[in-house]
Image (cartoon, rainbow, N blue to C red):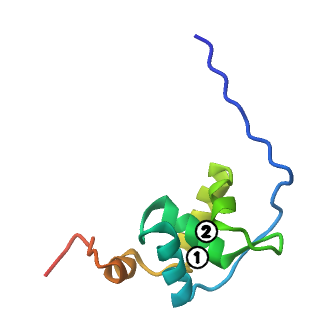
Amino acid sequence: MKITVAKKTQGTAIKEVKINPVTVQDIIDASRLSGGMEGAAFMAALLSQICEFDGEKKTYEDVTGLAAAVFFDLSAALVTSGVLPSEGALSTLSGKDTSPTKG
């Protein structure tokens, strides 16, 4: 069996992504856009709200069309930079407490 991995070519590679501070309105808008506050859809919606790609905003649809490696790099940058609230805070906001210890 022959397996071929096709590589998606994008017109222009992204050179710089600026991540702006997250506001409550950004979280609300991303939640409405994605239909919830968890998962890849929420992260893509949030990225579309707070990031500038080479100085320009991208739509939710544009962000979901990014290469997976770029999406995961941006998602990791949000988590490790402290730009996003903690998982516990997001769970509280979404009405789902996912913390392992409940008292």
Mark 1 and mark 2: Cα distance apart in space: 6 Å
Q: In the image, residue 27 lies at what x, y percent?
A: 51, 81
Vertical relation: 83 (above or below) 37: below
Check disc 1 and report the residue beneath it: 81
Q: Residue furthest bottom?
A: 24
Residue 77, numbered circle: 2
State left or right for residue 79 relative to residue 57. Answer: left
What kind of element bears circle 2? helix
- Density class for disc 2 (Cα within 10 Å; few <14, some 14-19, many ≥20) is some
Q: Nearer the viewer, residue 32 or 15?
A: 32
The disc placed on residue 5 is none
Q: Residue at x 80, y 68 (%)?
A: 16
Percent position (x, y) of residue 72? 59, 57
Relative height, residue 13 to residue 77 (above, below): above
How crowded pointer 1 is (Cα within 10 Å; few <14, some 14-19, many 20+) is rated as few
Name the side, left or right, on which 64 lies relative to 40: right
Kind of residue indicated by mark 1: Ser
